[in-house]
Amino acid sequence: MKCISCNSTFDIDQNLIVCPKCGGLLEIINEKEIDIKRLKGKGVWRYKDFIPGNYKKIVSLNEGNTPLIKSRKFENLYFKFEGLNPTGSFKDRGMTIAISSAATLGYKIVVAASTGNTAASASAYSARAGLKTILFLPKGKVAKGKLFQSILHGAHIVEINGNFDEALDKVKKLFNKNKDVYPVNSFNPWRLEGQKTIAFEIFEEIGNPDFVIVPTGNAGNIYAIWKGFKELEKSGLIEKIPKMIAVQSSGSSPIADYIIGKKKKIEFVENPETIATAIRIGKPVNYMKAIKAIEDSNGYAIKVDDKEIIEGQKELAREEGIGVEPASASTIAAYHKLLNNGYLNKYDKGVLILTGHALKDPNILFEEDSYSISSNDIEVFINKLKI
C-alpha cells in the first residue's frame, strides 16, 4: 500500500483506510498477474484472486456482470450499463468489497456520506451482512428514489443543512473520533478494488478500447477503472491503457477545470449545482487519483451543462433503449462534444460508463407536458407517426 500524498509505503493491511502518517489517500498495489484463463464464476468475485485482502465473510448480491451494450447509432461505441447492478448503480461493485471487509474485520456499524447511490448501496449490503448503517445526507438534495432505497433497507439517516462535501467532512470526523464505525466512501481504497472490475469485464468482452468516458463526481470510479486497465497492462494482456476521460457538469467541474485549464492547482467549487445529483460534488476526495489516471492514460476531461445532460438522457432512452439517471447521460453529451471538437473520431472504439439506472431519479422529465396525448386525438396522432 502506498500513500498518494507522502509516498509512505505499508504492507497490505485491511485495517488501513487512510495513511497512518499523514492521513492521505492510500493506493493498494496488486502484485499478482492476471490470468484470465483460470477465472471461474461471474461478477465482481470472479476476480477475487486479483483483489488484495482476506475476505472470510463475503457479502454479495451478485453484483457485476453488467451488460456491455453496442450502440445502435455509433458503430464503435459501447455502453457499460452499471444501472443493472442490484441497487441500480456501479456503487455495488465497491460495496461488496467494502462491506465484506467490514464484516471480516468484525465491525458492526458502517458510515457513509452520499448524494444517493452510495447510501442506497451501503444500506442494502449492510442489511445483507447484518450490520447497521449511518448515513449523512444533504437535506433536500438526494433524489427520492435513492432516499427511498436507504429508508427501505433500514439505514439511520442524518440530514445535514449543507452539501455532499460537508456531509463527507462529518463522516471523516466521526471515523477519526470513533474507530467502531467503518467508512465506506471512496476514500476507502478497498471499495475501489471492487470498482476496478469494470475494466476487467470490458476487456473480457471486447478487448482493449481506445477510450473510456466516466461521469466524475467524487472521482473514485475513473481511478478504479484506470487501475483495472493498469493491472491488465502489467500482466501483459494489453499494450496500452485506454484514454480515461472524465466528464463533469459545468456547475460542478473542479477536475475538468484543472485539466482543461492546465492549472497548477485544483480549485474546488464551494456550492456545486447541477441536475445530475450523483456528480454534484465540488471537492472530490479522490481528485489526486483521478488526475493521475487521466494523465497516465493520456486522457482528458470535459464539461457539459444541464441542458446537454437532459438531451443525452432522452437520446439514450429514445434512440438506444437505455434508461439512465442524469449523471450517466453526461457521457453521451461528452461523446458528442469530443467528436465535434476532433478529440475523438467515429472509428475510435470506446465505452461510456452508464453509472446509474433511470429509476434512481425519475422526476426530471415529468416537467415536460409532451409525453401525454388526448384519447380523442389518437387517430390523428397515429397518422402523424406514419409520416
Image (tube, grey):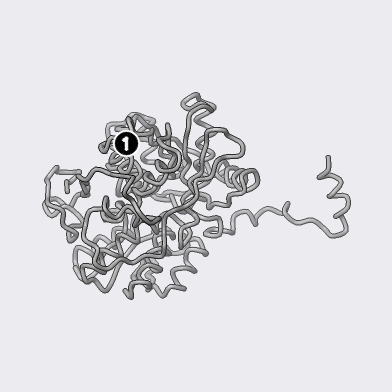
Residue 264 quadrant: top left
- Residue 104 vs 76, above or below: the answer is below
- Residue 250 vs 155, above or below: the answer is above
Q: Which residue lies at the image location 40% right of the left edge and 45% below the top edge?
A: 216
Could you tell me which secondary element the residue under label 1 belongs to?
Answer: loop
Q: Which residue lies at the image location 51% right of the left edge and 35% below the top edge?
A: 335
Q: Position of residue 11 (x, y in %)?
A: 12, 52
Q: Position of residue 138 (x, y in %)?
A: 41, 62
Q: Residue furthest top?
A: 342
Q: Nearer the viewer, residue 211 or 177?
A: 211
**Which part of the image, by quadrant, shows the C terminus?**
top right
Q: Which residue lies at the image location 31% right of the left edge and 38% below the top edge?
A: 293
Few, some or many residues within 10 Å of mark 1 (<14, 14–19, 20+): some
Q: Nearer the viewer, residue 216 or 72?
A: 72
Q: Nearer the viewer, residue 19 or 41?
A: 41
Q: Position of residue 380 (x, y in %)?
A: 88, 50
Q: Residue furthest front?
A: 38
Residue 377 quadrant: bottom right
Q: Please give left or right for residue 233 compared with residue 279 in the image.
A: left
Q: Is residue 266 visible?
A: no
Q: Nearer the viewer, residue 187 or 191?
A: 191
Q: Which residue lies at the image location 65% right of the left edge and 46% below the top edge?
A: 318
Q: Please give left or right for residue 370 compared with residue 353 in the image.
A: right
Q: Position of residue 229 (x, y in %)?
A: 33, 40
Q: Amino acid at mark 1?
A: Leu
